[in-house]
Amino acid sequence: MADLGLLRFLHPTLRIDQKLAMILEETRQVLAWHRLLYLDQPCRQWLVYLLALMTSLSVREATTFCERFEVPPRHRQFLLREKISTARIAALMKRAIPERPSGLYHLLKDLSPEGLLHLMGLMRKKAGKKAISFYVTDWRHLKPETDGNDLERMGYQAGPLYGTILRCLLDARLDGLVHDRATERAFIKEHFSLPDQETTYGHP
Protein backbone atom coordinates (compact mmCIF):
# COMPACT_ATOMS: atom_id res chain seq x y z
CA MET A 1 0.00 0.00 0.00
CA ALA A 2 2.87 2.36 0.79
CA ASP A 3 4.53 1.62 -2.56
CA LEU A 4 1.28 2.36 -4.38
CA GLY A 5 0.62 5.53 -2.41
CA LEU A 6 -2.54 4.11 -0.87
CA LEU A 7 -1.76 4.80 2.80
CA ARG A 8 -3.09 8.34 2.42
CA PHE A 9 -6.53 6.82 1.98
CA LEU A 10 -6.22 5.30 5.45
CA HIS A 11 -5.13 8.65 6.90
CA PRO A 12 -3.60 11.73 5.22
CA THR A 13 -0.59 11.79 7.57
CA LEU A 14 0.11 8.05 7.47
CA ARG A 15 3.36 7.15 5.72
CA ILE A 16 5.96 4.42 6.10
CA ASP A 17 9.13 6.16 7.22
CA GLN A 18 12.22 4.42 8.55
CA LYS A 19 10.94 4.40 12.14
CA LEU A 20 7.55 2.91 11.30
CA ALA A 21 9.12 0.37 8.92
CA MET A 22 11.34 -0.79 11.78
CA ILE A 23 8.38 -1.05 14.17
CA LEU A 24 6.41 -3.11 11.64
CA GLU A 25 9.36 -5.46 11.12
CA GLU A 26 9.88 -5.81 14.87
CA THR A 27 6.15 -6.52 15.22
CA ARG A 28 6.39 -9.27 12.60
CA GLN A 29 9.25 -10.90 14.49
CA VAL A 30 7.46 -10.58 17.84
CA LEU A 31 4.33 -12.25 16.45
CA ALA A 32 6.42 -15.07 14.99
CA TRP A 33 8.03 -15.56 18.43
CA HIS A 34 4.64 -15.56 20.12
CA ARG A 35 3.24 -18.20 17.74
CA LEU A 36 6.09 -20.54 18.66
CA LEU A 37 5.15 -20.34 22.36
CA TYR A 38 1.89 -22.22 21.73
CA LEU A 39 0.16 -20.41 24.57
CA ASP A 40 -3.48 -21.10 25.33
CA GLN A 41 -4.36 -17.40 25.34
CA PRO A 42 -5.28 -16.29 21.81
CA CYS A 43 -3.89 -13.15 20.21
CA ARG A 44 -5.60 -11.16 17.45
CA GLN A 45 -2.63 -10.47 15.21
CA TRP A 46 -4.48 -7.98 13.01
CA LEU A 47 -4.99 -5.72 16.03
CA VAL A 48 -1.28 -5.86 16.85
CA TYR A 49 -0.40 -4.83 13.29
CA LEU A 50 -3.02 -2.09 13.37
CA LEU A 51 -1.61 -0.74 16.64
CA ALA A 52 1.85 -0.74 15.05
CA LEU A 53 0.55 1.07 11.97
CA MET A 54 -1.11 3.71 14.17
CA THR A 55 2.06 4.37 16.19
CA SER A 56 2.83 7.67 14.47
CA LEU A 57 -0.75 8.95 14.70
CA SER A 58 -1.95 11.13 17.54
CA VAL A 59 -4.93 9.98 19.58
CA ARG A 60 -7.16 12.38 17.64
CA GLU A 61 -5.82 11.11 14.31
CA ALA A 62 -6.25 7.52 15.43
CA THR A 63 -9.84 8.30 16.42
CA THR A 64 -10.49 9.82 12.98
CA PHE A 65 -8.91 6.75 11.37
CA CYS A 66 -11.26 4.44 13.28
CA GLU A 67 -14.30 6.56 12.50
CA ARG A 68 -13.48 6.78 8.80
CA PHE A 69 -13.33 3.02 8.47
CA GLU A 70 -16.27 2.41 10.79
CA VAL A 71 -14.26 0.33 13.23
CA PRO A 72 -16.77 -1.20 15.67
CA PRO A 73 -16.98 0.76 18.95
CA ARG A 74 -15.56 -2.09 21.07
CA HIS A 75 -12.51 -2.41 18.81
CA ARG A 76 -12.16 1.36 18.62
CA GLN A 77 -12.12 1.71 22.39
CA PHE A 78 -9.67 -1.18 22.65
CA LEU A 79 -7.27 0.30 20.08
CA LEU A 80 -7.25 3.76 21.63
CA ARG A 81 -6.84 2.43 25.17
CA GLU A 82 -3.96 0.15 24.22
CA LYS A 83 -2.33 2.83 22.08
CA ILE A 84 -2.32 5.31 24.98
CA SER A 85 -1.17 2.72 27.54
CA THR A 86 1.63 1.25 25.44
CA ALA A 87 2.97 4.69 24.49
CA ARG A 88 3.08 5.68 28.18
CA ILE A 89 4.77 2.44 29.27
CA ALA A 90 7.25 2.55 26.37
CA ALA A 91 8.31 6.05 27.45
CA LEU A 92 8.77 4.88 31.05
CA MET A 93 10.77 1.82 30.03
CA LYS A 94 12.91 3.90 27.71
CA ARG A 95 14.05 5.91 30.74
CA ALA A 96 14.44 2.93 33.08
CA ILE A 97 13.29 -0.67 33.17
CA PRO A 98 12.02 -1.67 36.63
CA GLU A 99 14.75 -3.55 38.46
CA ARG A 100 12.41 -5.94 40.25
CA PRO A 101 10.02 -8.33 38.48
CA SER A 102 7.21 -7.06 40.73
CA GLY A 103 7.73 -3.53 39.41
CA LEU A 104 7.50 -4.73 35.82
CA TYR A 105 4.47 -6.88 36.66
CA HIS A 106 2.46 -3.92 37.96
CA LEU A 107 3.55 -1.81 34.99
CA LEU A 108 2.32 -4.38 32.46
CA LYS A 109 -0.52 -6.22 34.19
CA ASP A 110 -3.37 -4.18 32.67
CA LEU A 111 -2.24 -4.59 29.05
CA SER A 112 -4.00 -7.05 26.76
CA PRO A 113 -2.02 -9.78 24.94
CA GLU A 114 -2.16 -7.58 21.83
CA GLY A 115 -0.93 -4.57 23.79
CA LEU A 116 1.98 -6.54 25.24
CA LEU A 117 3.13 -7.71 21.82
CA HIS A 118 2.74 -4.21 20.40
CA LEU A 119 4.86 -2.89 23.27
CA MET A 120 7.55 -5.46 22.47
CA GLY A 121 7.51 -4.21 18.89
CA LEU A 122 8.10 -0.67 20.13
CA MET A 123 11.10 -1.62 22.27
CA ARG A 124 14.43 -0.75 20.65
CA LYS A 125 16.66 -2.25 23.33
CA LYS A 126 16.98 -6.00 23.88
CA ALA A 127 16.69 -5.52 27.64
CA GLY A 128 13.19 -4.13 27.23
CA LYS A 129 12.07 -6.95 24.94
CA LYS A 130 13.59 -9.52 27.28
CA ALA A 131 11.82 -8.09 30.32
CA ILE A 132 8.44 -8.14 28.56
CA SER A 133 9.06 -11.66 27.26
CA PHE A 134 9.64 -12.88 30.84
CA TYR A 135 6.33 -11.31 31.83
CA VAL A 136 4.50 -12.97 28.91
CA THR A 137 5.97 -16.43 29.48
CA ASP A 138 6.49 -16.64 33.26
CA TRP A 139 5.24 -13.81 35.43
CA ARG A 140 1.83 -12.96 34.01
CA HIS A 141 0.06 -16.00 35.47
CA LEU A 142 2.14 -16.38 38.63
CA LYS A 143 0.13 -16.61 41.86
CA PRO A 144 0.94 -17.33 45.51
CA GLU A 145 0.17 -20.81 46.77
CA THR A 146 -1.48 -19.24 49.82
CA ASP A 147 -5.11 -18.13 49.53
CA GLY A 148 -7.84 -16.67 51.72
CA ASN A 149 -8.65 -20.03 53.29
CA ASP A 150 -5.04 -20.37 54.42
CA LEU A 151 -5.10 -16.88 55.92
CA GLU A 152 -8.26 -17.75 57.84
CA ARG A 153 -6.66 -20.89 59.21
CA MET A 154 -3.65 -18.83 60.28
CA GLY A 155 -5.96 -16.65 62.34
CA TYR A 156 -6.35 -13.54 60.18
CA GLN A 157 -9.82 -12.02 60.04
CA ALA A 158 -11.48 -11.79 56.65
CA GLY A 159 -11.57 -8.30 55.14
CA PRO A 160 -9.48 -5.83 53.13
CA LEU A 161 -6.34 -7.11 54.89
CA TYR A 162 -6.56 -10.30 52.85
CA GLY A 163 -6.11 -8.34 49.62
CA THR A 164 -3.14 -6.45 51.05
CA ILE A 165 -1.45 -9.64 52.25
CA LEU A 166 -1.98 -11.48 48.97
CA ARG A 167 -0.69 -8.53 46.90
CA CYS A 168 2.45 -8.32 49.03
CA LEU A 169 2.83 -12.07 48.80
CA LEU A 170 2.60 -11.94 45.00
CA ASP A 171 5.32 -9.29 44.90
CA ALA A 172 7.50 -11.44 47.16
CA ARG A 173 6.89 -14.44 44.91
CA LEU A 174 7.78 -12.46 41.79
CA ASP A 175 10.96 -11.13 43.39
CA GLY A 176 12.07 -14.57 44.57
CA LEU A 177 11.68 -13.84 48.28
CA VAL A 178 9.34 -16.81 48.71
CA HIS A 179 9.04 -19.98 46.65
CA ASP A 180 6.56 -22.34 48.31
CA ARG A 181 3.73 -22.45 50.86
CA ALA A 182 6.11 -22.74 53.82
CA THR A 183 8.17 -19.67 52.91
CA GLU A 184 4.97 -17.77 52.11
CA ARG A 185 3.61 -18.58 55.56
CA ALA A 186 6.84 -17.38 57.18
CA PHE A 187 6.75 -14.17 55.11
CA ILE A 188 3.18 -13.45 56.21
CA LYS A 189 3.95 -13.99 59.90
CA GLU A 190 6.99 -11.74 59.64
CA HIS A 191 5.22 -8.83 57.95
CA PHE A 192 1.63 -9.00 59.24
CA SER A 193 0.81 -9.22 62.93
CA LEU A 194 -2.18 -11.18 64.19
CA PRO A 195 -4.72 -9.46 66.49
CA ASP A 196 -3.71 -11.70 69.41
CA GLN A 197 -0.49 -13.53 68.61
CA GLU A 198 -0.40 -15.55 71.82
CA THR A 199 -3.64 -17.30 70.97
CA THR A 200 -3.78 -17.26 67.17
CA TYR A 201 -0.31 -18.61 66.35
CA GLY A 202 -1.45 -21.93 67.75
CA HIS A 203 -3.90 -22.37 64.89
CA PRO A 204 -2.98 -25.05 62.30
Image (spheres, rainbow, N blue to C red):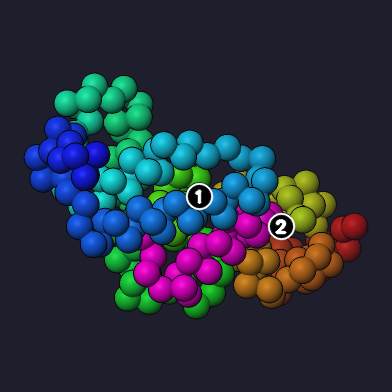
At horizontal 41% and vertical 59% (from top left) the residue drawn is: 26
At horizontal 20% and vertical 57% (from top left) the residue drawn is: 17
User: Considering the image in quadrants, where does the N terminus appear?
Assistant: top left
| Residue 148 to residue 42: above or below | below
Q: Is residue 183 visible?
A: yes
Left or right: where does residue 193 sit relative to residue 3? right
Tell which of 117 and 32 is nearer to you. Answer: 32
Name the residue type under label 1: Leu
Circle 2 residue: 144
| Residue 122 to residue 39: above or below | below
Is residue 35 shown in magenta? no
Q: Is residue 168 visible?
A: no
The secondary structure that most of the magenta stretch takes on is helix
Residues drawn in magenta: 122-144
Name the residue type under label 2: Pro
Task: Give the structural element (helix, strand or loop) at label 1.
Answer: helix
Residue 199: image quadrant is: bottom right
Tell which of 186 and 88 is nearer to you. Answer: 88
Left or right: where does residue 21 sit relative to residue 167? left
Confirm or deny contact between disc 2 and disc 1 (CB under 8 A). Answer: no
